[in-house]
């Protein structure tokens, strides 16, 4: 989280500017939280192979998502999510306020998927780079991790921490979507009950308005283009 003055990168609308890439799970969960919280932003869709200089001017890391809010630059997706919930509305208590121990557990779960699981997922997705194991073996490691961590939480509820989507669901499901996409046919047809529970949870997440409304295909942004906005209904 950086505090600087970035007026030269500000949008004429005066709204925060989100540098994003539609399929990136980190950018995806940022957009989901912004939409849920009712926070309007200017969207600048980035092509990862040809990133605009304005992105690097905002953030030296040069990866998405990056949110520029005038004098503040937020470079991490979970910080963007938390910012959105503070600045906007959190009518369903996505932050799980008042649920101290459960929120701490949820944070650890998200940490695990951001760290250990994402590393396993990358080996599965790019299995040709990790030939010490077959694609099927990489998939088995990922699926076992999912069954061990997520399936028990879905035994008695539709979402990870109750009957409605909360921050942990929004933070994790983009990675499960990415996992599914590596071999969609297998993911859709697997009959293991542990898998079915996760697949149905993912389907519920993908059907939420928070997700559906942030997956519009935006044109690649370049300096001087008309403003494209993400405006929650």
Image (tube, rainbow, N blue to C red):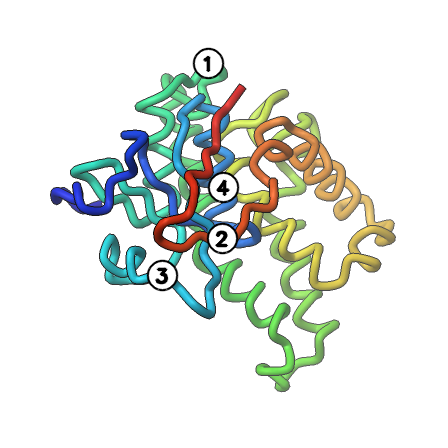
Q: Which residue is mark 2?
A: 21
Disc 2 to disc 4, C-alpha distance: 11 Å
Q: Residue visible at 44% across and 21% down?
A: 38
Q: Earlier in the sequence, mark 2 or mark 4?
A: 2
Contact check, label 3 and label 4, Cβ < 8 Å: no
Residue 29's disc is 4
- Relative to 167, say whether 66 is above or below: below
Specify the quadrant that holds the N terminus.
Answer: top left
Secondary element type, mark 3: loop
Most foreground residue, 184 or 139: 184
Q: Which residue is mark 3?
A: 52
Specify the quadrant that holds the C terminus.
Answer: top right
Contact check, label 1 and label 3, Cβ < 8 Å: no
- Mark 1 or 3: the one toward you: 3
Q: Residues within 10 Å of mark 4 (few under 14, many from 20)?
A: many
Q: Which x, y percent locates residue 48?
A: 46, 64
Disc 2 to disc 3, C-alpha distance: 12 Å
- Mark 3 or 4: the one toward you: 3
Disc 1 to disc 3, C-alpha distance: 36 Å
Q: Which x, y percent locates residue 139?
A: 69, 66
Q: Residue visible at 29% across and 38% down?
A: 11
Q: Earlier in the sequence, mark 2 or mark 1?
A: 2
């Amino acid at each position: 989280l950086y505090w600087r003055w970035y007026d030269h990168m500000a949008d004429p609308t005066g709204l925060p500017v989100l540098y994003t890439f539609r399929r990136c799970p980190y950018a995806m969960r940022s957009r989901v939280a912004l939409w849920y919280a009712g926070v309007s932003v200017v969207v600048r869709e980035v092509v990862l192979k040809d990133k605009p200089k304005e992105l690097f001017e905002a953030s030296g890391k040069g990866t998405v998502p990056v949110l520029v809010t005038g004098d503040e630059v937020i470079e991490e997706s979970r910080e963007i999510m938390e910012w959105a919930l503070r600045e906007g509305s959190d009518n369903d208590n996505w932050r799980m306020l008042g649920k101290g121990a459960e929120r701490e557990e949820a944070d650890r779960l998200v940490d695990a998927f951001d760290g250990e699981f994402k590393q396993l997922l990358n080996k599965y997705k790019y299995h040709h780079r990790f030939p010490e194991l077959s694609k099927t073996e990489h998939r088995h490691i990922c699926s076992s991790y999912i069954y061990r961590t997520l399936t028990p939480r879905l035994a008695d509820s539709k979402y990870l921490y109750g009957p409605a989507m909360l921050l942990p669901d929004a933070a994790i499901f983009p990675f499960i979507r990415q996992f599914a996409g590596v071999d969609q046919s297998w993911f859709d047809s697997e009959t293991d009950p542990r898998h079915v529970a996760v697949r149905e949870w993912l389907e519920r997440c993908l059907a939420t308005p928070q997700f559906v409304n942030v997956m519009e295909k935006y044109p690649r942004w370049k300096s001087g283009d008309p403003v494209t906005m993400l405006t929650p209904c």
